[in-house]
Image: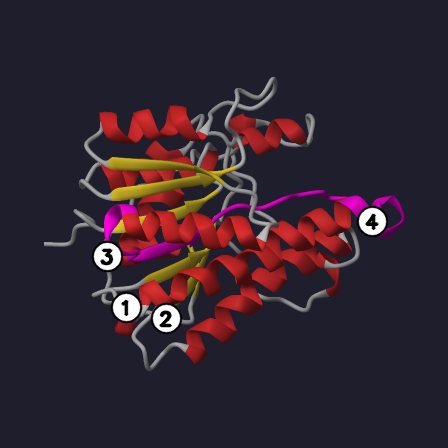
Amino acid sequence: MRSLKNKTLFITGASRGIGMAIALRAAADGANIIVAAKTTEPHPKLPGTIYSVAKEIEAVGGRALPVALDIREPEQISEAVKQAAAHFGGIDILINNASAINLTSTLETPAKRFDLMMGVNMRGTFLCSQACLPYLVKADNPHILVMSPPISLEPRWFGPHLAYTMSKFGMSMCVLGLAEEFRDKGVAVNALWPKSIIATAALAMLGDVVKPAFCRRPDIVADAAYAILTRPSRTCSGRFLLDEEVLTEEGVTDFTPYAVEPGKPLLPDLFL
């Protein structure tokens, strides 16, 4: 029987949105969750803190360790991973979920925003993976799951928001490289991306560009992540997976319950 019971998941950006949804789905099995994120105090515009999510995890049957972490800081990553491994006796799964978004053109992207996206998205994914791998190679069924899109060199994805595209494809390149480098160690490294836009707090930060009514809920990504993470690591690695495709492989045929407003046309996510 597939389960994440007693598995230890280190999840970046787990204080809200997709990261929180994945955490709660795993916690329902009785998993151990490291809630690694920057938000320790309530944000005026965004819901959730590492502590509020930890309480929700424990309420559904999991165990939680909230850890304040800025993944742009290597020393913080190293300390957080050591603390997590010591607390739960190892690390089985890493979810590279934390991400910064700024859909601006080249002339409208200040250096500070460029550095933020590169630091959180690409560099953060690399450094968190690097820190967790010594523990993952010792786990029974180790997985790294990166929330990044299939790599595409189509100019239409680069022209409108070059910096963001480079940062997200940088995450995807980590998937390609790590999957190959650690294949013989049995560590699965995969990417997961939503087929349709997901209604999260990040939408509010983009203004009124996307209406939640035309989106799906984070649950679909969480269910797809669960399906991937409960597969044998040596049989599923180096793949760029879409949430709907994963669940179709699992036998799901009705995706209506995942819609924010069933019946409304869904907006495809970026890079698809």
Kind of residue sitting beneath label 4: Ala
Q: Residue at x 33, y 70 (%)?
A: 187
248 left or right of 140 in image: right
**In the image, residue 29 above or below residue 139:** above
Q: Position of residue 131 (x, y in %)?
A: 45, 61
Q: Residue at x 29, y 31 (%)?
A: 57
Secondary structure of residue under mark 3: loop
Question: Which numbered disc, 4 or 1, marks the residue that appears first in the sequence?
Answer: 4
Mark 3, residues whose alpha carbon is within 10 Å: few (<14), some, or many (≥20)? Answer: some
Secondary structure of residue under mark 1: helix
Question: Which numbered disc, 4 or 2, marks the residue that appears first in the sequence?
Answer: 4
Mark 2, residues whose alpha carbon is within 10 Å: few (<14), some, or many (≥20)? Answer: many
User: Whole-Å distance between the Cαs marked 3 and 4?
Assistant: 40 Å
- Return the residue at label 3: 230
Residues 18 and 15: in front is 15
Residues at marks 3 and 4 touching, judged by CB atoms closer than 8 Å: no
- Return the residue at label 1: 233
**In the image, residue 155 above or below residue 272:** below
The magenta region covers: 87-112
- Return the residue at label 4: 111
Q: Residue at x 39, y 66 (%)?
A: 133
Q: Residue furthest right?
A: 107
User: Whole-Å distance between the Cαs marked 1 and 3?
Assistant: 8 Å
Q: Position of residue 200 (x, y in %)?
A: 51, 32
- Return the residue at label 2: 237
Q: Position of residue 176 (x, y in %)?
A: 50, 73
User: Whole-Å distance between the Cαs marked 4 and 2?
Assistant: 35 Å
